[in-house]
């Protein structure tokens, strides 16, 4: 959740995968974004207008700077990043603070 950009998070997970045996577990914790809150859409829209004016790359919906960079995840987004990095989601909870268990494939 503290790594900016999906591609960089996937790259990081792939590096970790090299050190996990096949079918070995991975535990990740994160902040969750439940549903489709409008404030995340507004933050991304305004942020991307400013970043375009500054000639910077776009931010992703779910990115926040409070008190430091944090990316909030929806289950589907987390699962897709895990799959892209060589894992399969085997457990998930988003009751308060999110966590997921994945298996290296």
Image: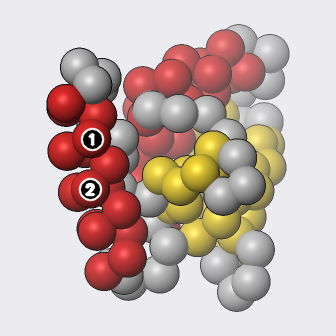
Secondary element type, mark 1: helix
Whether residue 71 is visible to the viewer of this picture, yes or no, is yes
Q: Which image quarter: residue 87? A: top right
Q: Which image quarter: residue 11? A: top right
Count of labels shown? 2
- Compared to residue 27, the image places residue 17 above or below, namely above
State the image coordinates of residue 99 (x, y, percent, origin top left). 73, 64
Q: Are marks 1 and 2 in contact (CB under 8 Å)?
A: yes
Query: Is 8 on the left-hand or right-hand side of 99?
Result: left
Q: Residue at x 26, y 56 (%)?
A: 46
State the image coordinates of residue 95 (x, y, percent, origin top left). 70, 86
Which residue is more in the foreground, 61 or 93? 61
Q: Quadrant of the C terminus?
A: top right
Residue topped by disc 2? 46
Which residue is more in the foreground, 55 or 88? 55
Query: Is 79 on the left-hand or right-hand side of 16?
Result: left
Work out how far the residue at label 1 is from the one at label 2, CA to CA, in angstroms: 6 Å
Q: Residue at x 67, y 14 (%)?
A: 15
Query: Is 10 on the left-hand or right-hand side of 57?
Result: right
Whether residue 76 is visible to the viewer of this picture, yes or no, is no
Residue 1: numbered disc = none
Q: Residues within 10 Å of mark 1 (few under 14, many from 20)?
A: few
Q: Residue at x 48, y 52 (%)?
A: 63
State the image coordinates of residue 83 (x, y, percent, origin top left). 45, 39
Residue topped by disc 1? 50
Q: Residue at x 65, y 78 (%)?
A: 94
């Amino acid at each position: 959740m503290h790594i900016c950009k999906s591609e960089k998070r996937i790259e990081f997970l792939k590096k970790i995968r090299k050190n996990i045996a096949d079918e070995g577990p991975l535990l990740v914790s994160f902040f969750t974004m439940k549903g489709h809150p409008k404030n995340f859409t507004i933050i991304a829209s305004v942020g991307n207008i400013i970043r375009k004016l500054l000639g910077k790359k776009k931010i992703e919906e779910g990115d926040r700077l409070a008190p430091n960079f944090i990316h909030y995840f929806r289950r589907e987004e987390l699962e897709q990043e895990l799959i892209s990095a060589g894992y399969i989601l085997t457990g998930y909870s988003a009751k308060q603070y999110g966590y997921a268990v994945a298996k290296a494939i």
